[in-house]
Image: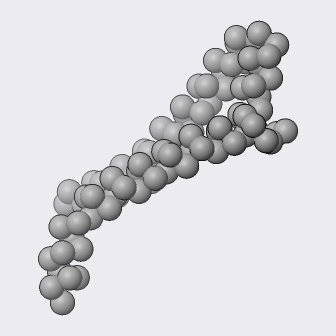
């Protein structure tokens, strides 16, 4: 009973921080893997834009990657953090 009422609630901020860090590392790893191995995806579009010296494509893909990261942060992690603060 002590674990459920004391220890887990006290550890929740650290658990959510670990989840955010894990998601960010996974997202960066996915982008890196797409740069190396995938023929379709954001990493591939980024690499093609770089090879063709198309800076508008590179910046557009970077903005999409940032937007996806911010959306996930706002839709998933922000409500979790707000609930923990309550």
In the displayed structure, 70 sits above or below 46; it is below
Q: Which residue occupies the foreground of this view, 74 or 38?
A: 38
Q: Can the viewer see residue 79 in this picture? A: no
**Residue with the most extreme right position:** 39
Residue at the location (64% across, 17% down)?
59
Residue 74 pos. (x, y %): 43, 44
Q: Colour scheme used in the picture? A: one colour
When the figure is inspected, residue 9 is found, relative to residue 61, above or below; the finding is: below
Q: Work out which residue is located at the far front of the displayed protein and give it.
A: 36
**Residue 16 sits in which quadrant?**
bottom left
Q: How many marks?
A: 0
Q: Does 9 sit left or right of 65 as displayed?
A: left
Residue at x-position 22% and y-position 82%? 4
Which quarter of the rendering shows the C terminus?
Answer: bottom left
Q: Is residue 10 left or right of residue 32?
A: left
Q: Is residue 8 above or below residue 85?
A: below
Q: Quadrant of residue 3?
A: bottom left
Q: Nearer the viewer, residue 75 or 54?
A: 54
Q: Which is more toward the observer, 30 or 61?
A: 30
Q: Residue at x 18, y 75 (%)?
A: 7
Q: Position of residue 31 (x, y in %)?
A: 65, 38
The x and y percentages for residue 35 are 72, 34
């Amino acid at each position: 009973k002590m674990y459920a009422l004391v220890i887990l609630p006290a550890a929740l901020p650290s658990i959510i921080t670990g989840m955010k860090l894990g998601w960010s590392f996974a997202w960066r790893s996915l982008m890196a893997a797409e740069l190396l191995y995938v023929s379709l995806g954001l990493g591939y579009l980024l690499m093609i834009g770089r090879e063709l010296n198309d800076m508008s494509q590179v910046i557009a893909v970077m903005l999409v990657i940032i937007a996806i990261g911010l959306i996930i942060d706002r839709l998933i992690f922000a409500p979790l953090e707000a609930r923990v603060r309550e």
